[in-house]
Image (tube, coloured by chain):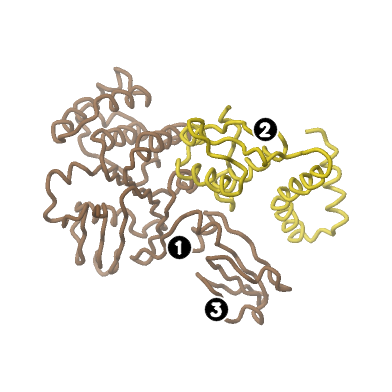
Amino acid sequence: MTPSPIQMCGVAKQFGSKAILDNLDWEVRPGQVVGLLGRNGAGKSTLMECLLGLRETDGGSVLLFGEPLHALTDATRARIGYVPQKSDLFEWMTALQMLDYFKAMYPRWNDAKVASLLERWGFDGLMRNKPIRRLSGGEQQRLSIIRALAHDPDLLVLDEPASALDPAGRRSFLSELVDGVIEQGTTVVFSTHILTDLERVAPDVAFLKDGRIALQGELDTLLDGARRVIGPASVLGAALPGELRRSQAGDGSVCVIVQGGSALADTPGVRVEPLGLEDLFIEVTR
Amino acid sequence: MTTSLFSIIPGSSDPIYRQLVDQVRRLVAGGQLAPGAALPSVRDVAQQLTVNPMTVSKAYGLLELEGVLDRRRGVGMVVADRAAGAGAGAGAAAAAADRAALLRPTLERAAREARELELDPATVLALFTLILKESP
């Protein structure tokens, strides 16, 4: 069996006295495209940095393609691509110098893809030869994506890759993800706050909350089964099947978020509503 | 077959695959997609709408299971013969009922919103009649 690209077991990470990752277990299987969701400060970037070995963990184990992080072979390292949320490295180099520098480090480098992406994403002669620090935030982000895709990685980790892109740039990035990456069977993990982007490309979502993966599943299944059930406390007193959370309104009515659908749709006095991804995000991460 | 046949609204409570399924059903029932007509390829639809190809193939797969589409070797997905919408004679009434059933989810949403706004049924029906009469 092919080992999972990512397997994390009991991973812990503290900043001072604050636990960011708390005994976190997570597995991403080959070819999965997973959207990582969580509130600001939930630790999405930390999780990504820890799983890539860019940050020391306080405990637990991480296997990438079946190899422990501390003993990762160069061959496996070369199978991984990463787009950090903000890259401030190599700012003195020009785009072309930086790409050449990275090309020398990888056994595999797709020159045709790099040339085509530079062309399509507006890197004309002038821009290719400007120091990176003089590029705009969006341009730097596009360059960082090109760098991460250039060696045709088998595992691509993207930390808010579209945060600095305008809507046209985002769409163009998503197209490349759909056509150049997902079609190739690449395993992708990416975090974003733009939930409509996520819905377009990620069949699976994982919610990071309180230092753990609180909920993971197929997005379609979650959306198909997510319901907001509102009714009097007398009817909704006991825990419902698939209950995620509940709250009480001032007028005494109870609002329960469930997954897996609700059989209460025909109960008098009870309202059952479907939830969109944004509502689901708010309810699960609250 | 043009891929701009479909449009999606991400972010709604209807998952994208279901939006695609509903659209194909409506186009077939309404006769815009005739029996034997070829559907655009999964890859073309995925590219055109910028969605994961898995989502498109899931929608096509479900439509195949329902008998709306047929997988034809070398051609891809085509509209199934017996999926014809408006037929002649006795079939026509059943076909109209099928088409009306397709409107139900949209109307259910409207009904829910009407209840939330505490509108009485007569007002809502009058408004809907008015909308039906407006030219598109």
Colour of chain B in the rendered structure image: yellow
Q: Where does the C terminus of chain B fall, quadrant-wise?
A: top right
Residue at the location (20% across, 35% down)?
A: A90
What residue is shown with label 1?
A285
Residue A239's disc number: 3
Which residue occupies the foreground of this view, B115 or B20?
Answer: B20
Q: Amino acid at mark 2?
A: Ala
Colour of chain A in the rendered structure image: brown
Q: Amino acid at mark 1?
A: Thr
Q: Is residue A205 left or right of residue A143?
A: right
Q: Is residue B115 above or below residue B47?
A: below
CA gap, disc 3 and disc 1: 19 Å
Q: Earlier in the sequence, mark 3 or mark 1?
A: 3
In the rendered image, residues at marks 3 and 1 fall on the same chain: yes
Residue A105's disc number: none
Q: Is residue B77 left or right of residue A144?
A: right
Residue at the location (58% across, 71% down)?
A: A256
Residue at the location (31% across, 61% down)?
A: A26
Query: Residue A75: image x %, image y %?
Result: 14, 43
What residue is shown with label 2?
B34
Badge 3 crowding class, 10 Å Cα cut-off, few under 14, some 14 to 19, many 20 or more, is: few
Q: Is residue A260 above or below residue B36?
A: below
CA gap, disc 2 and disc 1: 46 Å
Mark 2 or mark 1, which is nearer to you?
A: 2
The secondary structure type at the circle numbered 2 is loop
Query: Residue A278: image x %, image y %?
Result: 52, 54
